[in-house]
């Protein structure tokens, strides 16, 4: 594996990537230096000798825009034609315009009570979700259940007031739990929009960076969390993902504040 050096320490590529992702989670998504640099006042660069002519490189095939436009149009048409959640699930499961489908074991549409006032939007199925075909059933899902139990809500609650409904941006597991790429998100969005429309919750919780990227076109969950916003035409609350809370237990205090804020919002919407 390639190695790189960070502050004199040699890191393997995986650790370097984890460090970078950690910094992005913390909101450091822009490279800046400690002191400003006046780039108009920098010494002129020495003239470099011309490079020898490089051998002709093979031209990469152009990005297949027609193909992604066609897949997106098909997703839009399928989603629009579904008039129930069952019909939407079957349309989305049958859609072949997403490569992830080939590598996944099971389709993960939703879990919980579709009549719930709160829709929780997660990222994508992980290993356990892929095995069971249900979102949030691994360790992060167990923490999610405990978090909502603390405010009297559960995915198996029959009463819509106390229930949650859980959906992911992606319904197929990305290999190795990598982040979904923009094409995978784009082609899943028509189904997700229709899903929210049909479930018609009162509020949406955006769990982590990927749902914020998909619904708000913004990342930096540590800055966004706790700030009410609007997604899919509904009040929406970004929160840190339970997987993040498992790695950073000190962030649970803020997550608790966000849960209380959600509870207060639900109460204010009921009166
Ligand atoms: N993380 C998510 O965002 N969704 C799942 O279903 C599981 C883990």
Image (cartoon, rainbow, N blue to C red):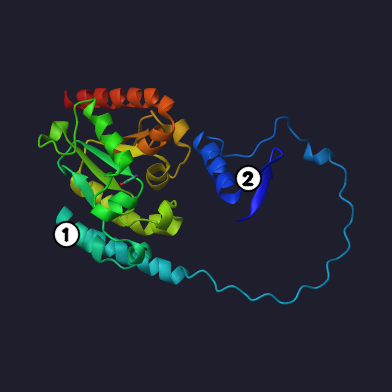
**Quadrant location, ligand no. 1:** top left
Residue pictured at 17% horizontal, 53% vertical: 85
Which image quarter holds the C terminus?
A: top left
Q: Is mark 2 within 8 Å of ligand 1?
A: no
Which image quarter holds the N terminus?
A: bottom right
Which residue occupies the extreme left position in the image? Answer: 158
127 left or right of 164 in image: right
153 left or right of 216 in image: left
Quadrant location of residue 119? top left
Mark 1 and mark 2: Cα distance apart in space: 49 Å
**Depth order, front residue of 161/6:** 6
The image shows residue 210 at horizontal and vertical percentages of 41, 45
Mark closer to the observer (1, 2): 2
Residue 206 visible? The answer is: yes
Label placed on residue 87: 1
The image shows residue 268 at horizontal and vertical percentages of 22, 23
Residue pictured at 27% horizontal, 55% vertical: 131
Q: Is residue 108 above or below residue 94?
A: above
Q: Earlier in the sequence, mark 1 or mark 2?
A: 2
Q: Secondary structure at mark 1?
A: helix
**Depth order, front residue of 33/247:** 247
Q: Is mark 1 within 8 Å of ligand 1?
A: no
Residue pictured at 14% horizontal, 31% vertical: 161
Residue 232 visible? The answer is: no
Residue pictured at 20% horizontal, 43% vertical: 200
Circle 1 crowding by C-alpha within 10 Å: few under 14, some 14–19, many from 20: some
**Depth order, front residue of 124/35:** 124
Q: Label 2, on which residue?
A: 11
253 left or right of 31 in image: left
Q: Secondary structure at mark 2?
A: strand
The image shows residue 222 at horizontal and vertical percentages of 46, 32
Q: How many numbered marks are there?
A: 2
């Amino acid at each position: 594996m390639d190695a790189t050096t960070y502050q004199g320490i040699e890191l393997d590529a995986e650790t370097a990537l984890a460090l970078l992702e950690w910094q992005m989670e913390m909101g450091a998504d822009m490279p800046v230096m400690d002191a400003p640099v006046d780039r108009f006042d920098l010494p002129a660069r020495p003239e470099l000798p011309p490079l020898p002519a490089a051998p002709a490189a093979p031209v990469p095939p152009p990005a297949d825009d027609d193909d992604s436009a066609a897949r997106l149009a098909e997703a839009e048409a399928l989603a629009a034609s579904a008039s129930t959640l069952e019909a939407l699930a079957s349309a989305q499961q049958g859609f072949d315009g997403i490569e992830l489908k080939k590598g996944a074991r099971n389709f993960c549409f939703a879990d919980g009570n579709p009549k719930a006032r709160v829709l929780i939007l997660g990222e994508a199925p992980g290993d356990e979700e892929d095995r069971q075909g249900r979102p949030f059933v691994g360790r992060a899902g167990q923490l999610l259940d405990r978090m909502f139990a603390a405010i009297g809500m559960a995915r198996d609650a029959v009463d819509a007031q106390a229930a949650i409904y859980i959906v992911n941006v992606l319904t197929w597991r990305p290999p190795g739990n990598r982040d979904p790429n923009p094409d995978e998100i784009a082609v899943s969005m028509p189904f997700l929009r229709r899903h929210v429309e049909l479930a018609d919750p009162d509020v949406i919780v955006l769990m982590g960076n990927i749902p914020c990227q998909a619904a708000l076109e913004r990342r930096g969950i540590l800055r966004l969390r706790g700030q009410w916003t609007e997604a899919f035409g509904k009040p929406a609350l970004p929160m840190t993902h339970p997987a993040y809370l498992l790695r950073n237990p000190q962030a649970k205090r803020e997550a608790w504040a966000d849960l209380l804020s959600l509870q207060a919002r639900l109460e204010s919407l009921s009166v």
